[in-house]
Amino acid sequence: PPFCGGLLHVKEPGIFVCVVCGLPLFTTDHKFDSGTGWPSFYREFDPEHVARKPDLSYGMVRTEITCARCGAHLGHVFDDGPPPTGERHCVNSAALRFYARGRELPPESQPVKTEVAYFAGGCFWGIEHYFQQGPGVLDAQSGYMQGHVDHPTYEQVCSGTTGHAETVKVTYDPKRISYRRLLQAFFDMHDPTQENRQGPDVGEQYRSGIWYVNEEQKREALAFIAELEASGRYGKRKIVTKVEPAKTFWPAEDYHQDYIAKTGRACHVKNPW
């Protein structure tokens, strides 16, 4: 309950780490009194150390925060915090362990090494939503890629004149989930045999694509597609998924982010987990 946690009133300079795995999550430099009875921070120790996902419990739409390494529940983040971020990370004391400045951190308190993957599988709302559910996925963000116009808008992309594909940027911890497992989820979520469409959504912006960031991703993607084709999973239908080097990722407008969680709308995309 609020006002009972042992770390609520800690002001001594230091670092708050995950009680489960020891990953540094917050510091007293960013701690403030929110009046809520929960330790509150306007910034993470490192954004890559704290994962976010939609939380629809209790009839509300909130953003849950978890440890990016082990997935332990920390609390929630709200947009009513102080400058410069305007955010309030509301955290349960029981999820943290405090180390005063100068005290040696345990060996496990090492940074998370993240990697990024890009997938296009039709409308990005559902692809983003279900990638966010993946164990080891730290974040999924909707956007546009592979086009020839800078800072494209949704309307421009929908016109079919910019060359972009609706794409989801997946940030993940390779120690917890492999690129191959992301590929499996991606192909479970959409039909890679439909060219320039996905279900009722028709147009080049809905094409199936994997935009690789290095040669290892390229090799794995091509090998995985070859496996699928050899398996006969799609019968005589040919896989039309494009495999191309990633160009600039342009984040989509705010109203597209976490769209299904915000609206509660259903989606044809299948949960791959």
Image: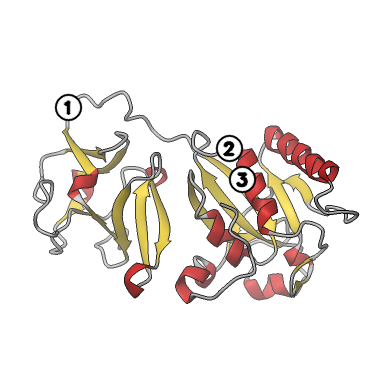
The three-letter code of the residue at mark 2 reads Ser
Task: Point out residue 179 in the picture as x, y percentages from the top left corner.
Answer: 62, 39
Q: Residue at x 32, y 50 (%)?
A: 73
Q: Earlier in the sequence, mark 3 or mark 1?
A: 1
Q: Is residue 254 something one can see in this rendering?
A: no
Contact (Cβ within 8 Å) of mark 3 with mark 2 = yes
Does residue 1 appear left or right of residue 75 in this picture?
left
Task: Point out residue 124 in the picture as x, y percentages from the top left corner.
Answer: 62, 64
Is residue 29 positioned above or below 199 on the image?
above
The N terminus appears in which quarter of the rendering? bottom left
Which element type, helix, strand or loop, lies under badge 1? loop
On the image, numbered disc 3 is attached to which residue?
A: 182
Which element type, helix, strand or loop, lies under badge 3? helix
Q: Which residue is outermost to the right? A: 236
Does residue 210 appear left or right of residue 32 in this picture?
right
In the image shown, does 54 or 102 lie closer to the viewer?
A: 54
Does residue 129 appear left or right of residue 249 in this picture?
left
- Distance CA(mark 3)–CA(mark 1): 40 Å
Residue 178's disc number = 2
Which of labels 2 and 1 is toward the front? 2
Is residue 47 positioned above or below 164 on the image?
above
Q: Residue at x 79, y 40 (%)?
A: 227
Contact (Cβ within 8 Å) of mark 3 with mark 1 = no
Task: Point out residue 93 in the picture as x, y percentages from the top left corner.
Answer: 18, 48
Picture quarter containing residue 56? bottom left
- Distance CA(mark 2)–CA(mark 1): 36 Å
In the image shown, does 106 or 164 lie closer to the viewer?
A: 106
Is residue 45 positioned above or below 260 on the image?
above
On the image, numbered disc 1 is attached to which residue?
A: 102
The three-letter code of the residue at mark 3 reads Leu
Q: Earlier in the sequence, mark 2 or mark 1?
A: 1
